[in-house]
Amino acid sequence: MRIQDVRELIDTRVHEPGAIAAAAARRARPASPLGAHGKVMIVAADHPARGALRSGGRAMAMADRADLLDRLCAALARPGVTGVLATADILEDLLLLGALEGKTAVGSMNRGGLAGAAWEIDDRFTGYDAAGIERMRFDGGKMLLRLDYADGRTAGTMEGCARAADQLNERRLMAMIEPFISYRDDGAIRNDLSTDAVARSAAIASGIGRTTAYTWLKLPVVPDMERVLAASTLPVLLLGGELADDPGAAFARWGEALKLPTAKGLTVGRSLLYPADDDVVGAVDTAVGLL
């Protein structure tokens, strides 16, 4: 991203903060979350707000905001990319850059479970709420639901997700729930990516809230995805996760999972924004080709 563009963003925030709401008010919204290919292709960039800045071997990859915005704009400009998932700071920068026209915009809601924090499993809603998403004319909200059976603080996160899902459903906005069965390993939170655990997390997340009319799930691709997706009738977006050692194999797994009836698309972040060869356009086009 050119330094002049960064300066213009900063100047707008300082001298014309109302330009953000004005850009949100005039943004062209998509008629459907589905693209012309009949699937969803969302680029995820909500990691920085939780202090999760690593991508592959680059510990601070996502700490350079201008570089991140440059990669996001490149990804959003590619045919077949239908939207973006991010926190308010990033979505508002993209609004000012004109990168959200006709794209699905999903606001990230609970970012309080900072990566590595003692309270990480107590994932408070410190980002968007449903009212804020509606006010900005965005299209949905995403929440992270990590379920640690050995940590009683999980109950508070689960309750917060149920409340947020209710409020989004009431507004006819997508409630995107990303569930994991989690556990502590030498003090760090790990996600159980076994087939049984992911299927169980899908079953639990499907029962969140008093209605699920607008609820979607965001699930990792694991072995035997057919059994995982049999756990629910809710539409599912497949998440990309960490940068894969073998991107080709990862793309092949995504392609196989996308053949299943409830798999309605991809929500991928670092794997596309920070590929090993730094070819963002190539990685995005490959992912879109799977749809």
Image (cartoon, rainbow, N blue to C red):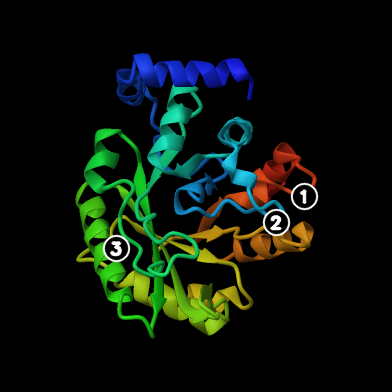
Depth-wise, is mark 1 or mark 2 nearer the camera?
A: 2
63 or 172: nearer the viewer: 63
Q: Quadrant of residue 241?
A: bottom right
State the separation of the CA atoms marked 3 and 1: 34 Å
Residue ID at (39%, 25%) = 28
- Residue 208 screen position, x and y as percent: 28, 69
Quadrant into which the N terminus falls: top right
Image point (63%, 60%), residue name: 242
Residue 185 coordinates in the image, percent (x, y)? 54, 81
Question: Visible in this render: residue 54?
Answer: yes
Query: Which is more foreground, mark 3 or mark 2?
Result: 2
Residue 167 image label: none
Residue on which the image places disc 1: 276
Give how far apart the Cα atoms at labels 3 and 2 are: 29 Å
Q: Secondary structure at mark 3?
A: helix
> Which quadrant of the view contains residue 205?
bottom left
Q: Residue at x 44, y 22 (%)?
A: 96
Element assignment for label 1: loop
Left or right: residue 73 versus residue 50 is right
Marks 3 and 2 close (CB-CB < 8 Å)? no
What is the distance, in whole Å, between disc 1 and disc 2 at their CAs? Answer: 8 Å
Q: Residues within 10 Å of mark 2 (few under 14, many from 20)?
A: some
At x 22% / y 58%, what residue is drawn? 166
In primary-sequence order, the first of circles 1 and 2 is 2
Which amino acid type corresponds to the residue marked 2 in the rendered image? Answer: Gly
Q: Earlier in the sequence, mark 3 or mark 1?
A: 3
As helix, strand or loop, the secondary structure at mark 2 comes to loop
Tell me the amino acid under the disc marked 1: Ala
- The residue that label 2 is drawn on is 56
The residue that label 3 is drawn on is 161
